[in-house]
Image: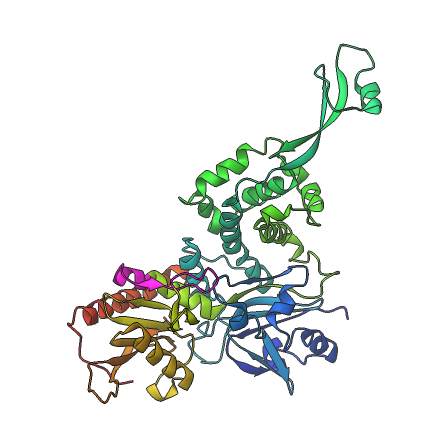
Amino acid sequence: MNNEYSGKTTDNRSASLNDIFKTDVPSDVINELKEISGKKISDLKNKDGFLIYCNEDKRKDDVEKNSVFTISDNKLTTYNIAGFVGTKHTFLTICSRFAKDSSNDSAIESGDDYFLHYMLQKVFNINISTLEHSTDRNKAFQFLPYLFKYYFLKALSQGLYKKYVWNKYNDSKVKGTIDIARHIKHNFIFTGNIAYNVREHSYDNNINQLIRHTIEYISNIKMFSMMLESDDMADLVQDIRSITPTYSEKNRQQVINNNLKSDIHPYYYEYEPLRQICLQILMEDDELKYGRQENKIYGVLFDAAWLWEEYLNTLVSEIDRSFIHTRNKSKENRIYMLENNGWEAYPDYYSSALDIVMDAKYKHANGINQIDSKDKMQIISYMHILGLKKGVFLYPSENDEEPKYRKLHLYHKENTDEYVYQYCFKIPQGEINDMQDFIDKITVSEKKFIEYWKSVLNQDEPVKKSL
């Protein structure tokens, strides 16, 4: 197969392969896609770590047992995963379901996925007001700098990477092993210098050189260069620059070659995903083909439900500082359903002081009857265990209209004052001119969201609107 096939779809969508790829998809392409179809994310993630899957706070059992997509009867069905994934000859972009053309609810041909990029900016604390126009493959590259910052900060939290390296010297302070061939070559006329090699513990090593080259590469990308100067990045970037005095742009290919195989010390385990991200960024000109001969599956994927939860956390924290955001992986602020620490649970956000628990749902829900029965039982359980009177579902709304909310009285034989709320957060739809236009419009939704919940929690609740 000589041709490459590029397709585009959205999360939580089922469509024919011919519609996604805009052509009759040959059986060879379908067979390649089936290498991903139905496979657990945990299995794909373990292919030399080449499939990058950003979800650090959800339990593995909760997410990684799921699939990126499934194929049945020539239809491809996606779930909560967004980003891009490919095989040797195919390339599939999965946008958020809010990347739509105003003229067609099912269309995604308008290009940039502003909502996905906006959530990534908020979650990873990166400010970008424009997206560069590029091909679908190059748009995939635009996801990588978000991950670079995330894994860069995680890696550097373990300290600067130090390892033993062989250094070559030619002076009178001899130590280590004399390099006879080099000595003869450079000291044919003896002046007191000796050529020798020394194995030393050094910061100026292949890993830090790789990171340095990535930093300099990103610094030349207009839409991401400011990221390196952010408060949480600037000092660390300067540290990398100061410990790599032998950096030279002309050595980039050699640095890449030196890092194709990992030899990172187990103590610095956070540097391994950073190594992979750096390689993919630096090999962007080769269209992310690093490892494609050895690993048929490659890509950068995000859990849209996780991003939605983390994005809302940036807003919930503005409503009131007493809100607690639980995190599964780090076991932060977990609660227990049974005595003696039995049946741990993780409500998304709750505040005992404000008598409220909130749950972020990246689902379609325009009516109260569309709420999944498991979700209903979950929010009521949280209210009961925490002893709170307000339970809230938070959904993204695909309707281009005012945000909707609903307040329902929770039945109780003692007629207590307990309520379940459903709030649909308006995501800008219709005609979006550019990234800045999207930011301006979603900022309006954010202000209304914060104002609404502040009014509810201050017992000055506005008139209810029916869903």
- Relative horizontal placement of residue 65, taking residue 319 as reference (left or right): right
From where the camera sits, is residue 417 visible? yes
From where the camera sits, is residue 431 visible? no
Q: Position of residue 264 (x, y in %)?
A: 65, 46
Q: Position of residue 349 (x, y in %)?
A: 34, 67
Q: Quadrant of the N terminus?
A: bottom right
- Residue 316's place in the image compared with 273, above or below, is below
- Relative horizontal placement of residue 449, taking residue 77 as reference (left or right): left
- Magenta: predominant secondary structure element? loop
Disc tally is 0
Q: Position of residue 82 (x, y in %)?
A: 52, 69
Q: Which residues are magenta?
A: 315-333
Residue 331: in magenta span: yes
Q: Position of residue 146 (x, y in %)?
A: 50, 55
241 or 19: nearer the viewer: 241
What colour scheme was applied to this rendering of the protein?
A: rainbow
- Relative horizontal placement of residue 15, taking residue 296 as reference (left or right): left
Q: Quadrant of the C terminus?
A: bottom left
Q: Residue at x 27, y 71 (%)?
A: 356
- Residue 195's place in the image compared with 227, above or below, is above
- Relative horizontal placement of residue 85, taking residue 406 as reference (left or right): right
Name the residue furthest front.
340
Residue 301: in magenta span: no
Q: Residue at x 31, y 68 (%)?
A: 350
Q: Quadrant of residue 392?
A: bottom left
Q: Quadrant of residue 398?
A: bottom left
Q: Residue at x 55, y 39 (%)?
A: 160
241 or 420: nearer the viewer: 420
- Residue 8's place in the image compared with 276, above or below, is below
